[in-house]
Amino acid sequence: MKVALQVTCVNDAMFPDTGKAVVRLLRRLGVDVDFPAAQTCCGQPMVNTGYLDEAVPVVRAFVDAFAGYDAIVTPSGSCAGSARHQHAIVAERSGDPALAKAVEQTAPRTYELTEFLVDVLGVTDVGAYFPHRVTYHPTCHSLRMLGVGDRPRQLLEQVRGIQLVDLPMATECCGFGGTFALKNADTSVAMGADKARHVRDTGAEVLVAGDNSCLMHIGGMLSRQRAGVRVMHLAEVLAATEASEGDSDGPAVDARAESFEGDAR
Amino acid sequence: MSARDEILGRVRAALADVAPAVDVPTAPRVPNRGDLVALFVERVEDYRATVTRCAPGDLADVVVAALDGATTVVPPRLGIAVPGAVVDDGLSAAELDRIDAVVTRARVGIAETGTIVLDHEPDQGRRAISLVPDLHVCIVDASQVVADVPDAIALLDPARPLTWISGPSATSDIELDRVEGVHGPRTLHVVLVG
Amino acid sequence: MSGTFVGMPAFPTAARAALGDTQLRRNLAHATHTIRDKRARVVAEVEDWEELRIAGAAVKEAALRDLATHLETLEASLVRAGATVHWARDAEEACAIVASVTRAHGADEVVKVKSMATQEIGLNEALEAEGIAAWETDLAELIVQLGEDLPSHILVPAIHRNRAEIREIFRRRMGAVGRPAPEALTDEPAVLAGAAREHLREKFLRARVAVSGANFAVADTGTLVVVESEGNGRMCLTLPEVLISVVGIEKVVATWDELDPLLRLLPRSSTGERMNPYTSTWSGLTPGDGPQEVHVVLLDNGRTRALADEVGRQALRCIRCSACLNVCPVYERVGGHAYGSVYPGPIGAILNPLLNGVSDEQTASLPYASSLCGACFEVCPVRIDIPSVLVDQRAAVIDSHRGDRVPKQEALAMKAAAWTFADARRLRWAERASGLAGRVLGRFSRTTLPGGRTAAGRLPGPAAGWTGARDLPAPPRESFRQWWDRTDGGRDGGRQGDGS
């Protein structure tokens, strides 16, 4: 099976550790994952803001980059949803039957990470070790657009050492919503404030989710509140092992190395 | 062009791209709930209505007891005698407003939802008489109870005016808290016969 | 006597004001959570809820797809049953018909059943201009009308008011328009409901003309259906001599039997009950029972515009249950007024642009009043894919500006992003620039995220929208693709920066 990582534009530019974690995790599970260098973005920022014409070249880049792969794995419910549900709309808008045909190939082959692990690979115990108190936020697009259901939870429950606590009002939107976070910043923040409160109520050390964009929003609020809760992508938790925990004295070493480097220069 | 022709023209133009046929699947039926009459009673009581079950022979006495001396109006063909009751012969709304209670029959009872439906035949009377008085005593025969909404719809004649009643009048308009008793009868007493 | 939505600011501005209203926030959170829980309980009781939704959606969809035929059938059935049928292209025509029928009977007042269609067309204001008083008789509508307020919810227009506020409105305003509130009025909901009963009863008993809408109109039998709770609907539909019903053309269902899924879906979705207290159905007139003159006004007012929209026409399936409002995290926080329409919430955010177009700034802001979380679609009893229609209406907004001589900043930014994302080489270049920015930020920023990563605190300019309340992680030194290239995807001994 030829498997491609669609790392997503947000992860590529802002959260490379998530992409690295997916690579590490899939290799550990025996999947030789490829990173097609021609990939860019799924086009969702344009589509969800109403810029359909602008999304056409982006979707074209997507289908070109991922042509010929059996599975396209992405650590984002939102981007998987975009590929599966919105690319056809963009292709129709383009009036290009070749693009529509190409989308018919890539759309059903695009999997959100937990779908790929549980449905395609058939694993729930990925051999992870993460001895921290964790709460999980099901992001809206993974929950309601893709219907990933309890797959993330099945995976988390098998992580050794984890203390998984329920998030109150878990299924309520965090208020990120892409450009909504800027166009309706006040409402977005009001929603995020409640989500952050529920996270704090759990007493968790780490908030985990399957979409870094939502985590950037919730985590940004928690950080501003000095709440003492950090956010992590689910892939990074699933990639963590005894070795990585021992080596690094905790999972945040990437980020810390980053800031140390910044300070040193 | 008349408004009618213009609107119909716009509708046709709007749907020029659409094939009319849509397959309408049959709505699912509720599973067999066993004792429908017991379910009906339970669900009517859930609305904070009163339910009294009685044998046919006791009906008149049970109705008199439910009325507890209230001034009462009855439809032309109620089928039982209610001592002292006024038989409706086209009473005005103002006259009905001075009467405390009404006794009617019903056409059908729906177990799943605890609903009674009146079709306002002469055993139930005009819509006004079961609306203006504050106490509605409604006689339902056990044989009239059906399982669910589709069964009721199949039995009812849409040419008749119909009133579906599920408990006493109520509102949730204040903080979405349900309170019983606004404009319709504030007390609903269902007498279930058989 | 009530307020007006005309001149409302765009959604973000109106929302900002609403978010600061602490009492509103509290009232809405309490009310929406109460009704959500009730709905969830009674929906869970129905084993085949999903099949029921599919059936309900199909009934409405089938009716819409052959709407002209069904409207003609409805008209013929109504006429056969003794009703008079009128057609109204727009709000003005509909209001004129109602006023003219009322005046023909020499009446200077009407009693009203709660009706979205008559709110949409501004009937009360139009009648007032003709010297006809329109009395709202639904409790929440009465609260809104007495308070000279605006409705903020489809089902419970006074959802933004709590019991203490309602008591004040009743105490101050009832006396001016009829029977005053009793001296001993408390803020107990039952007592308040009792005061409304006393106040309105004299109006019901004397009214000669009533105005209603309809939840459904059955084409093959000419039956109109009104679903309600309080009995005010029954009063209006039964006691007056004349009944005028204003019915949107999308309310049609083909056959009597097809009411079944809808009558099961609506109350559970709407008030969270197995069945609402009262449903009235009538087909024209019944000699000796109820109004002896029955008028039906079939209303377009933008519905054919919506019907022509390939993606958006599904919004006409809406049965006005309000479930989408009650679960919407945006609605829960800002309330209904911010939407600037009698149709607020997720359904309003698509219905208003579909009915009216997106040429004005306020309506054009509505499709963006959503985080696209999808909770609305999940609860919609007739399966309207609101998120998809929202996105499609956003495209309609953007397309309407494609001819602008001076494009908006956002449009320029999107074009630039599309250009960058069209070719991975451009993206690689952009990531180098962002990596550089990250290093600069790493040097100067004093903010670190929990866990240690450098972050941006408050930034000026367009970024302030984000950083006003949220820290922003600094871009990493190296993008993922740079790492992949440098380390051959981590195979080439590139353990550094790998986190392990």
Image (cartoon, rainbow, N blue to C red):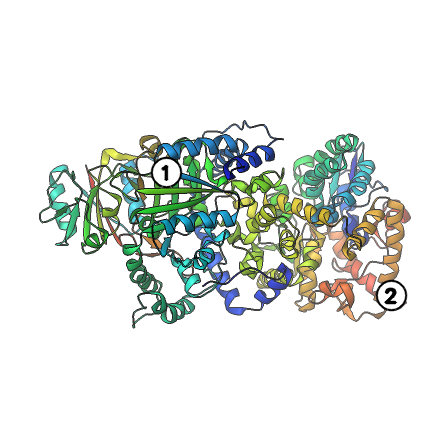
Placement of C155 over or under C445, stated as above or below: above
Residue C252 at x, y = what percent?
46, 37
Q: Residues within 10 Å of mark 2 (few under 14, many from 20)?
A: some
Q: Is residue A203 toward the left or the right of residue C217 in the image?
A: right
Label 1 to label 2: alpha-carbon separation: 77 Å
Relative placement, left or right, of A163 versus B96 is right
Q: Nearer the viewer, residue C362 or A92?
A: C362
Residue nearest the viewer, comparing B147 with C489: B147
**Classed neighbour count for the residue bearing mark 1: other residues with Cα under 10 Å, few (<14), some (14–19), many (≥20):** many
Quadrant of image for the C terminus of chain A: bottom right
Quarter-wise, where is residue C265 in the image?
Answer: top left
Q: Nearer the viewer, mark 1 or mark 2?
A: 1
The quadrant holding residue B76 is: top left
Name the residue furthest left.
Answer: B83
Kindly state the secondary structure of the residue where label 1 is placed: loop
Q: Is residue C270 left or right of residue A182?
A: left
Q: Amino acid at mark 1?
A: Ala
| Amino acid at circle 2 | Val
- In the picture of the structure, the residue carrying the numbered disc 1 is C83
The residue that appears at 81% across and 59% down in the rendered structure is: C475
- Residue A27 in the image: state x and y as whole percent: 78, 41
Mark 2 secondary-structure assignment: helix
Q: Which residue is mark 2?
A: C440
Q: Horizontal and vertical percent for residue A158?
A: 63, 46
Q: Chain of mark 1?
A: C
Q: In this picture, is C22 found above or below B167? A: below
